[in-house]
Amino acid sequence: MRSHIAVAAAAFAVGGVWLWAFLSTDSVWLFASLIVVAVLAFAFFQRFDAAGRYRRALATRPRRAALFAVLAVAGVAGGLRDQAYPLLMLCTVLLFVVACIGLNIQTGYCGIVNFAGAAFFGTGAYTAAVLSAHGVPHLFAIVAGGIVAALVGSLLILPVLRTRGYYAALVTIAFGILFSTFLEVNSALGGPQGLKLPGIDLFGWRFNRDIQLGGASASFYVNYLVLSLALALAAFVFARRVERSWLGLAFDAVRLDETAAATFGIGIARAKIIAFTLGNLLCGISGATYAMMQGFIAPNNFTFGESLILVSIVILGGIGNPLGIVPAALVIIVVPQKLQFIQEYRFLLYGCLVILILLFRPEGLLPRPLRNYFPESSA
Amino acid sequence: MTLAEPVTVADWLLTCRGLTMRFGGVLALDSLDLHVVQGEILGLIGPNGSGKTTFFNVLTGLYRPHAGRVEFAGRDITGHSPQQVCRAGIARTFQRSRLCLPLTVLDNVLIGNHPRLDNGVGFNVFRRRALRHQFDEGVETSRCLLATFNPDLAARLFDAAATLDMIDRRRVEICRALVNAPTLLLLDEPSAGMTHGETRELMDDILQIRASSSALTIVIIEHEMNVIERMTQRCVVLNYGEKIAEGPFRAIASDAAVQEAYLGQAMTT
């Protein structure tokens, strides 16, 4: 077990170096070879079930695993400290991870397919924009972003509860389109021009100032990285705890067989409302943070297309597994950015990549394992 | 087994009067009067489409009857939701297996224990130690219950239900129905899809469970007449949603109306 933990730590270190190179490289060939290396390493681990062994070993030490993840990201941040753009990409990935963990609670656990993820993300963003313009403390504005998204979701849940499957999905699609159209025509919220936001200011810690530590300096995006990482970890732990509990069991029962679930006393509506609200809360919080990091939001940030990106991250990662969301978000967000040199062809290549992954891994990069309520004590 | 004393209305656990269920123009239940005596095993038989499963679905709240009244343990439960019926103490299995195959055996059994589990968000997310306590209890209860059916099954508590064979899936389904200690168990064709040997084994298990908890009353839908003969004290025969006969198996097997429902009318020349 100890040696497995040591190997896992080494894997995190190698992963950190890989991520640093992946985010910062400008060379086409280096980028391509990094992807090939990742695919080979992944195939190797899958082939010998090594990934499973190390995953289980790490699962018995969840705090250790979180520490490794933080150290790896800290290392990457150190490596990228003065490169604003790669840092921004990494922050974006982490914030999308938060939103997708929210969608995963809805779709992956409870079976509510939500094609309006960007609408709830956007609700959080616009809430933060309006509140911060009125001088509301920023921490409160971010939390309020989540709460308002959850409240807006409680309107949408009414038609969702009355429909199932495709029909419920259609309801969310309609809502997503409604939302971005509403923003376009609403001049109080800036219309198509959107709104500007101030940088985050948490109790005097001003995020938009470059960091000076001794003689070294770092881009101000490191501030946002710290916050995004904290949010991502918190969302991850939260989702894990939801999954590994009676609540997660009730969600699964509702997703897999509503009739049987009802027969055993599970309140279908209650489960769906809780899952939907928790998911939208996470979407809203991540949207609010994202908006303040970007400093500017417009309706075209929150279109149906963005919702599809969120859903495809959840599917590509492996529906129901929050861990899979991390590599999936990296692929879906970073790869198109890195392929900008081939201009329009980048979406072609990127589309091929997603299809290839799902061809070889139809259940996503990391399919959901069986539920283990207390893995930390099963050593 | 015969009941020593004559059964009176006071011994009726479940009473249905004038129960009617329509699907479009089809009368699935036609003002059905039926009662279940406390502690008995009642067989519910009848040709395909005679309304047996519909009766279960109406009882458990999946369908709302168009007319009639259902009384369970002295309380009116007509038109109650499935959740309320579950809380009242009625559990069931389904004709087609309705296990959650991607979940573990433990998860499947514990779904049946839902009314006893704490489902608050705060409890589940933040009170992990208390959750742990409930979890350990749940594992112990499930293990004991599964072991009465099949000790090998108890050892597979943490395997996916999808890896089990048919008879073990049925056992898990029955355990899921039993884990919350219901007063009335409804078994919908437990022998479906199994061999005769497996069916016999499963019936032994059910009789064993019943011997250990005498309070359990069972209604069983079956097409296998030897199962009905062996398991039940009393049978009700349905045809086109109506009760056409009632009594011990031997009596109804020789009943002309029952034979007609199953085999068709005798040729009269």
Image (tube, coloured by chain):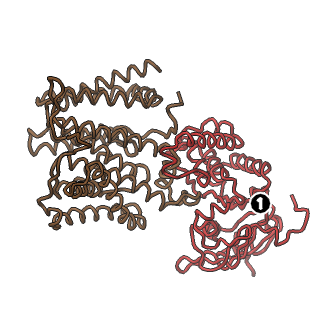
Chain colours: A brown, B red
Image position, residue A215 (x, y; %): 14, 23
Q: Chain of mark 1?
A: B
Few, some or many C-alpha atoms within 10 Å of disc 1 (few <14, some 14-19, many ≥20)? many
Count all numbered tags in the image, as a single digit.
Answer: 1
Asked whether B214 or A229 is in front, the reply is A229
A263 is higher (above) or lower (below) than A316: below
- For image coordinates 38% across by 27% down, the residue present is A47
Q: Is residue A238 visible?
A: yes
Decide if residue B63 is on the left or right side of residue B8.
left
Quarter-wise, where is residue B189 in the image? bottom right
- For image coordinates 78% across by 71% down, the residue present is B246
Decide if residue B241 is on the left or right side of residue A67.
right
Decide if residue A245 is on the left or right side of residue A188.
right
Local SS, label 1: strand
- For image coordinates 18% across by 32% down, the residue present is A23
Q: Is residue B263 visible?
A: no
Image position, residue B30 (x, y; %): 65, 79
Asked whether B144 or A139 is in front, the reply is A139
Image position, residue B29 (x, y; %): 63, 75
B167 is higher (above) or lower (below) than B228: above
**Given the image, on which type of amino acid does mark 1 rest?**
Ile
Question: Which residue is at the far right?
Answer: B4
A347 is higher (above) or lower (below) than A126: above
**What residue does disc 1 label?**
B41
